[in-house]
Image (tube, grey):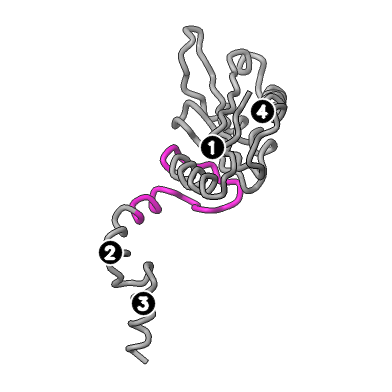
Amino acid sequence: MKLLKQRADVGNPMALGSPLLNHRVPKAMALMSRLSFWGQKGQIYSEEAFRHMLAIERKRASRSNRSLLLLLVRFKGASGRRVEIPPAVSAALFSGLALCVREIDVVGWHREGRIPGAVLAQGHSVLNSHAVPRIIERVTDVLRRRLSTNETKNLEVRVISLGRGQST
């Protein structure tokens, strides 16, 4: 019985004592410890977690020959530079983004405290030319209803196509 258990563990990269697990444990565990509430619905990912999920989704889209959209929301100050987003504004912003994305989409900080974003996985290999402008219009409309006029006057929503489909 013990021999069978050991043999099963050899093929399992996540089994304790596995050389693969021992090699990757420090990096993986360090990342997992920084990702609070990993995998929960409605999760707002930190910059590091968001970029990690973006990399996973890019690989998945590449393997399946599908497109991927990266939605970014920027606020610019009077000088035209990106500004730090206050916690109250970011809470309203993320609640607005939650209304615009699906449960399978990833939402979080593309740049911590400055640029919120969402990774939108696509089901088609080529994007409809009208999809990107409609996404921008919808997100901008929802955010303008949730934020004050003063907060939205320097609001910019961008959608970047990653993969096969191209944005307009």
The local secondary structure at tag 3 comes to helix
Would you name the residue on which mark 1 appears?
Answer: 163
Residue position for label 2: 22
Mark 4 to mark 2 CA distance (whole Å) = 44 Å
In the rendered structure, which disc, 4 or 2, sits on the residue that comes first in sequence?
A: 2
Q: Would you name the residue on which mark 4 appears?
A: 132
Residue 100 position (above or below residue 81):
below
Q: Badge 2 local density, few (<14 within 10 Å), some, or many (20+)?
A: few
**Taking 55 as reference, is 69 left or right?**
right
Give how far apart the Cα atoms at labels 1 and 3 are. 37 Å
Q: Disc number at residue 9?
A: 3
For the magenta stretch, what is the residue range? 28-48
Query: Is 168 positioned to the left or the right of 13 in the image?
Result: right
Q: Quadrant of residue 75?
A: top right
- The tag on residue 120 is none
x then y, percent, for residue 43: 56, 46
**Amino acid tagged 1:** Gly
Looking at this rendering, what residue extends furthest in the top direction?
Answer: 79
Q: Earlier in the sequence, mark 2 or mark 1?
A: 2
Question: On screen, 54 above or below 80?
Answer: below
Which comes sooner in the sequence, label 2 or label 3? 3
- State yes or no: discs 1 and 3 in contact (Cβ < 8 Å): no
